[in-house]
Amino acid sequence: MACWRALPPLARPTHTWRVSELPSGTVTFLFTDIEGSTRLTQRLGAESLVLERHNAILLDAIRGNDGVDFGSEGDAVFSAFASAQRAVAAAVQAQRAVAAEPWPADAALRVRMGLHTGEGQVAGDSYVGLDVHRVARITSAGHGGQVLLSGPTRMLVEGSLPGGTALRDMGEHRLKDLSRPEQLSMLVIDGLPSAFPPLRTLDVVPNNLPTQLTTFLGRQRELEEAGDLLRDARLLTLTGPGGSGKTRLSLQLAAEASDLFHDGVYFVPLGTIGEPSLVLPTIAQAMGLPDPRGRALDHLAEHLAEKRVLLVLDNFEQVLEAAPDVGELLQRLPGVAVLVTSRSPLRIYGEQEYPVPPLAVPDPRHLPDLEGISQYASVALFIERAMGVQPGFRVDVSNAPAIAEICARLDGLPLAIELAAARVRVLTPQAIMSRLDHRLSLLAGGSRNVPERQQTLRGAIDWSHDLLEPRDRVAFARFSAFSGGASEKAFAAVVLADWPPDAGPAPEALEALASLLDNSLVRQDTGGDQPRFRMLETIREYAAERLADAEPEPATRLRHAEHYLGLAEWAAERLFSEEQRSSLDTLERDHDNLRAAIEFAVEQGRAELALRLVSATWRFWQMRGYLTEADERARRALALPDAASHPQALLQTLDAAGGIAYWQGDLARARDLYQQEQDLAHELADDRREAQAIYNRSMTYNLESDSVEAADLAQQALAKYRSLGDRHGEGLAQWAYLNALAFQGEVAEGTAVAADTVAIFRDVGDRFMLAWALYTQSLTRIQARDLEGARVSLKEALQIFQETHDLSGYALVLDGFASVDWLAGDEDRAMRIAGAAAAIQDVSGVGLAQRNRRYAQFFPADLLDRAPLADAYTEGQRLSLEEAVALVTGSS
């Protein structure tokens, strides 16, 4: 199939078949396509004798093996078989005949073929459904002369192949329809070529394009037009109202264009990012690039120099102030292209805007026949989504006019059509049409200050909303407070609390969620242990407007923020226990909700709420590699005018902000914040917090090589903690003192203090600090050149960090293993481990490793002028986290 071309919703049959003649139930589809057909057609013309002969060969093979040729497009032929074995026999016959044909010298044909077995969903004189589109994508992954089979087809035929053929396993591949990976096999035919280039799938190019659960329908013209624009313009913005299909079109466009960007295609969702300053760091994070540490533009420019990459920035409308950053990025990186979806253009130099039109709709006044109606992309979308909620749904002469009318009245907007199709579960298309007709007439005079199509979309959602019972309307509006979805428990706490009496009795959580699911206003994610529920962003915006109308005071958003404060504080209490990993994972799942809660608190000037959220969340940010974001959020919370009125919350946030700066390696800022914490704690007569601040300050001096000041402060903190009877605090102060001893080279005393510190943290059950004490103990053992002892300490520390997926811990412990291997004389492995550690440090934002390498006098960056060591270091940088861990544990 030619580049950019998607399978049309339903293809025109090459022969008029009665519905009863089309195979149904389990059907094997055979699709064929001439490689390089566009060039061939341009040279020979669409009506050439060569193409006629090609068609004759294919139809002879299809019909001669009991197949039905139900559609074609140009040179592509679509056929179906009741028997998978007969479909394979047809493919073999056709390929042999094509190979044997004496084509003109300048017009030799090479035909690629795909076979897939699935459900034959008949609509009119053709087929619809996921399996039809699946076989089209399998075909497009191959090369001229190649026959590819899906896993289901292989299972049916591998024991009964035609003579002179065999199957070759091609492995699992992600096709360009962005659906689940497909296990592909190639049919090897004796006497015909069997060596081909790699398959044309998404696996060829690095990418993070998300898997899609539904078929991409229609949009062939848009893919061709936008694809041509993307070839020439380096900034292409797909514009249109919410629900017009911008995101899905951008993903498909990126998949189709992936061959043009050999260094990667990266999808960057911005729907939950409210601050323009976070756009570039979010791009870096989506690509797995190092933490930008406040210099995101330079960082991206360094890492993407000389690379050919496509960035897909989704939902840009809420961060339009970041448009100049995108423009500068493009100026500095000639090999990078950006595909944006936004309700508004970016309005920067070099931008090519492409307004995403609605899906094609039929004219209700001049309806074509059944087959003709099904050719419209909007109708095909309605049919497939209706089949998704009611598998037995079929288009016939009685309901086809109503379906066409629904699509036309909804202006072909995908979201509106999907909402309407969801009603097929309980209503006929005729009933849907009559209700929709009334609602659209009522809402024809919408706001004049929004685009016309947005008024139509608003009408479609209004219609769905107005069908809800009063209590469902309340739940719908309140659900908009969630960002990134919610658990059932969170839904009950935020949505069902303080239930308004005029909405009737408060429903049970599952009952209310089931109603919203049935109305396609909420979607369910089932990837984890517990289901989560989320709204499409367009629907969420509409629901938020309803909530604002119902609540002049933001009561639900306040409950939302307070609920996630409770969650964050609950998790924070468990971050240094055996529940650390599960607590971190809980916060990761609800990170977007935590962001929304902090944003609300800052916007509303609720200083105590903002401060407590930051102080409860900062360790999660540190352990999971969000230090840049953590720093910005801490600064905004501390800057609130009313912050000083909440001294206890301020005290905790100064500690958090100091910790964030410390882990970023900004020791001057960390020390300043810790000094503020100490002064405030002293003013409040909070001895425990004052001891904590003194301990914190000690650690900053340790890392700046002032071991005398570090040791003095550690001893001050130790005295305070002992006076308080705080065994855990005593361990912290001893750990700080241990770091000072390590720098001073006091090996004997350091060995004793290390053992005591490790014992304290084992005794109090703080596995987080136990891991760090073990890490520092390894540094002391490295100084003593007790390399096996150092390995033992590092191995136990690594095991703890593995349990919690603590990136900061991974980074430094791996660096410790590298130092041990270097001293042991294994320079190659030391450099590989050091490269892996450096990659993790860059991603996580940790800036402390360099200071700890002094104990082994091992500085990898200074050794990169030695080619073998540089190669090993580069190899290590390419290792995955799992591969790096396997490398060091295998050496232990």
Image (spheres, rainbow, N blue to C red):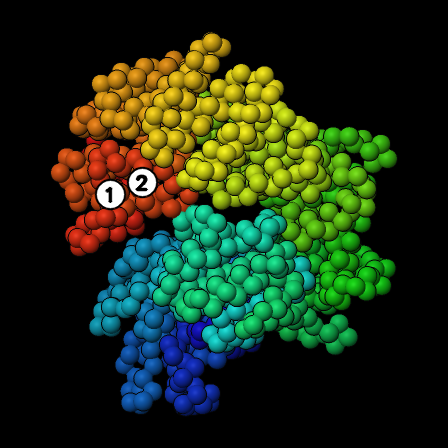
Give percent across and percent down for residue 593.
60, 39
Q: Which residue is mark 1?
A: 859
Which residue occupies the extreme left position in the image?
Answer: 825
Instruction: Locate residue 191, reporting x and y percent.
Output: 22, 72
- The answer to which of 438 and 272 lies nearer the viewer is 272
Q: Pointer 1: residues within 10 angstroms few (<14), some, or many (20+)?
A: some
**Circle 2 sits on which residue?**
850
Q: CA distance from mark 1 to mark 2?
A: 8 Å
Q: Is residue 516 left or right of residue 681?
A: right
Q: Secondary structure at mark 2?
A: helix
Q: Is residue 367 left or right of residue 647?
A: right
Name the image quarter holding residue 819.
top left
Question: Does the image show residue 573?
Answer: yes
Image quadrant in which the N terminus is located = bottom left
Which of 298/11 is in front?
Answer: 298
369 w.r.t. 746: above or below? below
Q: Is residue 681 above or below residue 111?
A: above
Front position in the image: 427 or 245 = 245
Task: Give amino acid for label 2.
Answer: Gln
Residue located at (22% from left, 40% from top): 858
- Mark 1 in CB contact with mark 2 (< 8 angstroms): yes
Query: At label 1, which amino acid type do we have?
Result: Phe
Q: Residues within 10 Å of mark 2 (few under 14, many from 20)?
A: some
